[in-house]
Amino acid sequence: METNGNHRYRKFKNAAMNFVSVGCAVLVISPLGFILFYLLRQGVQALNWDFFTKLPAPVGQSGGGMGNAIAGTLELLALASLLGVPIGVLGGIYLAEYGRDRLNDWIRFWADVLNGVPSIVWGMVAYALAVVPFKTFSAYSGGLALGFIMIPLVLRTTEEVLVLVPRSYREAALALGLPQWKMIVRIVLPTAMKGVVTGVLLAMGRVAGETAPLLFTAFGNRYWSQHLTEPIAALPLQIFAYAISPYDDWHRQAWAGALVLIFLVFLLSAGVRIFSNRQKAGATS
Amino acid sequence: MPMSLEEKSIKPAALAPAHQATPAPVTEVRIQGPGQPAERKEEVVFDISDLSIYYGANQAVRNVTLQIHARSVTAIIGPSGCGKSTFLRTLNRMHELAPGARHTGVIRLQGEDLYARGVDPTLVRRRVGMVFQKSNPFPTMTIAENVLCGLRLNGVKDKQLLRERLEQSLRMAALWDEVKDHLHRPGTSLSGGQQQRLCIARALAVRPQIILMDEPCSALDPIATAKVEELIHELKRTYTIVIVTHNMQQAARVSDRTAFFYMGNLVEYAETRTIFMNPSNPQTEAYVSGRFG
């Protein structure tokens, strides 16, 4: 009788716990659902082929698009990766494979501090380093700012996935008479490749939507930029400019821009998923 | 057939060859290619004197002096934590990878000081291969790539040579017939026992002179164990093998000489038959007869 009651109480506790956690999960997901839904509703009407290919229309004219901003964002991402990926990955390799404990702790600490630095501060750093000396806003300076943000992100994820590679593979490689660098490049990195790529894509997704660091570096551009030393348009900047404008047409385009941006980030995350699933088979055991 | 190997009795074959001990190490002897019968007088491969090994302040091995002979199987037995794996790992300079690792004493590999200044550990490891407790084929590589990895990554490009080595190494590891039709499947697709033989093939492909085995069968079932042991018997015609094992029956079956370690000390080192039938140290007797450890 008593065990029965106890049992019922336990079942109740389990159900309550279940209810609370499901509720919290729904609470977490629902804003995302609402945002996506609202974005789709507001953005789709302004989405058409012109939006992806045309320049913004002058004030007063309808139509036009964000072609230059989409291209600009992709260019900025490429520039940022050029800076952030090699430094981040090599730094991660150092932490995981070479570093000494004391120094590693410092590097990790600083990387975590840098991860928490507000992105507009990175914009100011890039402004001081690349805008002031050359006296012009440029794609380079925007890429620099975004690259700075990527470095600590890529560094930490790379370190984490490299450390997960079992020691036995390292030992097997060394026991074959391979030097350490070759062991890292040919055995450890390929084994952890999925995780490294995942980290890079996540970092790209993170910086793709950054606006603040671009305000006074990439600066924005109403035209196609001819050269990386010129100011360049970027989706977040364009969205910002259009959203605070007084024109309904521009508001609609801002929604469409936001939709495209979120889709871009979604594509990067999907890339992460596809990549990690495809390699999963090989990485076990 | 393999079941008989599981019996407690000691196989006469493992104890049959009698060895004359040579007093001094013979240096400058090249190990011949595979299939070459051992015809030289017994030479000393590893000459170890007064070896102590430490992890930081912890002493794992105490003042060990022993000689390991060419083209024979030397087993190292002893209870867990007795320093046998540590001892093995100093023989190909893997021990020094552990943080705080150091040692005193001298190890000579065919007369050369293994730890002399200027000796490149990667070159030592090409001469002294290793097979680990847990099979560890590289997960990103196929069976063929695993076997050839040591050669390719050390710069061998000759396709003909690589093809030959692939087949030779897999044949020597008694794996060729099982995998020859799917050499391009992932190495991790094989069974546990096959993976371990793949790792042996991988170690053989770089043509080491000595192969260290760190409990190579401890994760294998009896049938796979029997195959690996058979393989060890084959390999000792060409290679010098040092095997650490937890399994005394295995030591008795495969080895010519046995060293018994206890608490970091080398308690007794003699021909395997002597260790198991007529040990001079009471501790050895207690251990091999299963009274402790």
Image (cartoon, coloured by chain):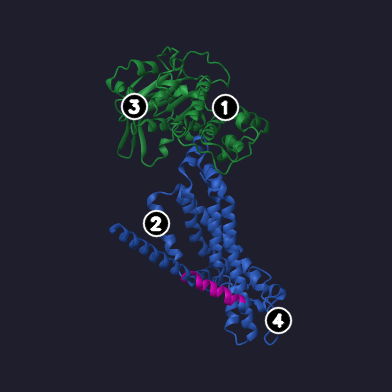
Chain colours: A blue, B green
Q: Amino acid at mark 2?
A: Trp
Secondary element under disc 4, as helix, strand or loop, is loop
Single out the mark in the foreground, 3 or 2: 3
Which residue is drawn at the image coordinates 56% and 35% (left, top)?
B150
**Magenta region: which residues?**
A27-40
Answer left or right for A16 relative to B123: left
Answer left or right for B251 relative to B39: left
Specify which label sits upstream in the sequence, 1 or 3. Answer: 1
What chain does mark 3 sit on? B
**Disc 3 versus disc 2: distance between alpha carbons?**
42 Å
What chain does mark 4 sit on? A
Answer left or right for A167 relative to B169: left
Q: Amino acid at mark 1?
A: Ala
**Disc 1 versus disc 4: distance between alpha carbons?**
73 Å
Callout 2 crowding tier (Cα within 10 Å): few <14, some 14–19, many ≥20: few
Q: Camera-side residue: B193 or B133?
A: B193
Q: Amino acid at mark 3?
A: Phe
Contact between labelled residues 4 and 3, with CB atoms less than 8 Å apart: no
Contact between labelled residues 2 and 1, with CB atoms less than 8 Å apart: no
The picture quadrant where one finds residue A10 is: bottom left
What residue did someone put label 3 on? B261
Q: Is residue A36 magenta?
A: yes
Contact between labelled residues 2 and 3, with CB atoms less than 8 Å apart: no
What residue did someone put label 2 on? A106
Single out the mark in the foreground, 1 or 2: 1
What residue did someone put label 4 on? A63
Q: Is residue B165 visible?
A: no
What chain does mark 2 sit on? A
What residue did someone put label 1 on? B174
Which residue is drawn at the image coordinates 31% and 35% (left, top)?
B59
Which residue is drawn at the image coordinates 59% and 76% (left, top)?
A39
